[in-house]
Amino acid sequence: MIKKTLYFENPAYLSMKNKQLVIKLPEVAKNDTLPESFKQEAVKTIPVEDIGVIILDNKQITITHGLLEALLGNNCAVITCGSNRMPIGMHLPLESNTTQSERFQAQIGASVPLKKQLWQQTVQAKITNQAYVLKTCRNETVKNMLAWVKDVKSGDSDNLEGRAAAYYWANMFPHIEGFRRGREGVAPNNLLNYGYAVLRAVIARSLVASGLLPTLGIHHHNRYNAYCLADDIMEPYRPFVDKLVVEITENGEDFQEISKDMKIKLLGIPVLDVIINNQRSPLMIAASQTTASLARCYLGETRRIAYPSFE
């Protein structure tokens, strides 16, 4: 089942009743001049079990502890945004898998050779998907990138991920003066940052559901990063966000600021079509298959991660 992604941009009272998320608007609830029947009709409800990601993007949103507990108990990722309207934090459940302790131990005890092989597969999948986007969206030569895919060694000791990224970003937005990929760079970096934040939440949620610690990465290991493994696993998924951002930038709308319509499109990332295990699937479902396969790698049941592709 595809879980819903909910985005709250305006003031709201969020609570829970009968396993339903209850949404009330403050301007309606506080208005004593409105009839009670109108107030009741203005209340919206959504089953908690149908929600996969919630984004809170207004300082006047009130959320009850009971609802937060229910959301986390349902393995929902709750994202909060800062004053710049960009995601700044994320809540995830501490447990959502019946064999979590066993999987934690297997993850912690993973050998260096295994992690290097897993990173090799991750880089290969990422470059393959980048090559598809560059060829499809920009009609650029990608023979070099496809050659690099074959040359990636265990642990990517030659840093072909970095070489591919330099070529990829140099050709993705050549018409935008001064564009370089970076969090603080010129637009459409703002769109990429927002899309990656949504993607990161989806991957982190799937990791927790698979009984894994998002903190312990196979390659990323920044001591201040609580989501190293999520950042590892999301790498082959990033090109799906990149392709969506290209489409947004080419519809003629000013993308210096992220509009409501742009956010709506970026919030559709969990339901983007991908191909995984030779079947077409929504990205959120594919993420669950990827993290489940990673858990099996840690448990010694397989040595390959299932990653998505475009074709």
Image (cartoon, rainbow, N blue to C red):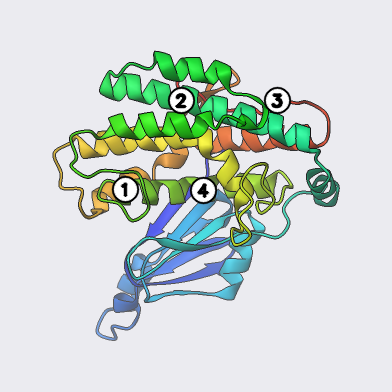
Tell me the number on the disc at residue 265: none
Three-letter code for the amino acid on which mark 2 is drawn: Asn
Q: Is residue 241 left or right of residue 185?
A: right
Q: Amino acid at mark 1?
A: Asn
Under circle 1, the secondary element is: helix
Q: Quadrant of residue 38?
A: bottom left
In terms of image quadrants, where is residue 6?
bottom left
Marks 3 and 1 close (CB-CB < 8 Å): no
| x and y, in percent, of residue 81 in the image | 41, 65
With respect to residue 167, does 80 lie above or below? below
Q: CA distance from mark 4 to mark 1?
A: 16 Å
Q: Residue at x 35, y 44 (%)?
A: 181
Which label sits on residue 200?
4
Please tell me which of labels 2 and 4 falls first in the chain. Answer: 2
Local packing at callout 2 (Cα closer than 10 Å; few below 14, some 14-19, many 20+) is: many
Which residue is identified by label 3? 304
Crowdedness near tag 4: few (<14), some (14–19) or many (≥20) residues, C-alpha within 10 Å: many
The residue tagged 2 is 129
